[in-house]
Image: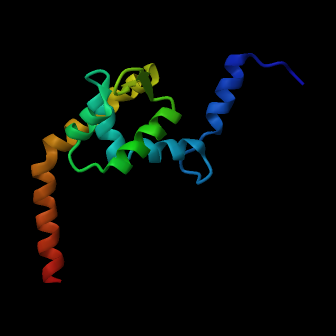
């Protein structure tokens, strides 16, 4: 059996990931990063470290439960780091890791695209609803 370099092993492992397969770990990651709360939290953290309460105020409509769950999952995936500063009261900050920062340009572009193209989407939705209603 021939010896393979670390680079060759990484390349082989990368080829094993196919997000179209239900069991692929990359699919789970795609599920995570395509979540609306993830998109909003990552873009909110692009400005630098923020406290939980700052994120909660900035992201309208997110429940305490969803914000907590999403931050924990992002921390688990290595995209966000949680820093605790002992004080009274305890200060907890969240910020993007180096890995999370690599995701930011992509998510930022998706957010910008959605904000820019909403009028066209609304027009398409209205046209679709009009056709559906008359059918």
In the displayed structure image, the side of residue 13 where residue 75 appears, left or right? left
* 123 versus 76 height, above or below: below
Q: In which quarter of the image is the C terminus?
A: bottom left
The residue shown at (45%, 36%) is 74
Q: Most extreme residue toward the front, as rendered? A: 88
Q: Most extreme residue toward the bottom, as rendered? A: 135
Q: Most extreme residue toward the right, as rendered? A: 1
* 8 versus 56 height, above or below: above
In the displayed structure image, the side of residue 12 where residue 41 appears, left or right? left
- Which quadrant of the view contains residue 125? bottom left
What colouring does the structure picture have? Answer: rainbow
- Which quadrant of the view contains residue 91? top left
Q: Where is residue 62 in the image (x, y as percent from the top left)?
A: 28, 48
The residue shown at (40%, 43%) is 68
Q: Observer-nearest residue: 135 or 51?
A: 51
Q: In which quarter of the image is the N terminus?
A: top right
The residue shown at (29%, 21%) is 48
* 97 versus 65 height, above or below: above
The residue shown at (44%, 27%) is 82
Q: Where is residue 58 in the image (x, y as percent from the top left)?
A: 20, 37
Q: Observer-nearest residue: 2 or 79?
A: 79
In the displayed structure image, the side of residue 96 where residue 19 appears, left or right? right
Q: Position of residue 108 (x, y in %)?
A: 27, 32
- Which quadrant of the view contains residue 129? bottom left
In the displayed structure image, the side of residue 47 where residue 21 appears, left or right? right
Q: How many numbered circles are shown?
A: 0
């Amino acid at each position: 059996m021939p010896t393979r370099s670390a680079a060759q092993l990484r390349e082989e492992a990368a080829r094993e990931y196919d997000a179209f397969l239900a069991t692929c770990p990359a699919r789970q990651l795609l599920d995570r990063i395509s979540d609306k709360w993830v998109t909003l939290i990552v873009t909110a953290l692009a400005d630098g470290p923020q406290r939980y309460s700052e994120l909660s105020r900035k992201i309208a409509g997110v429940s305490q439960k969803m914000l907590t769950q999403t931050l924990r999952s992002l921390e688990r995936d290595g995209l966000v780091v949680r820093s605790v500063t002992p004080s009274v009261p305890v200060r907890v900050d969240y910020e993007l890791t180096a890995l999370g920062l690599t995701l930011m340009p992509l998510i930022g572009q998706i957010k910008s695209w959605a904000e820019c193209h909403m009028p066209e989407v609304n027009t398409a939705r209205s046209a679709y609803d009009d056709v559906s209603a008359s059918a």
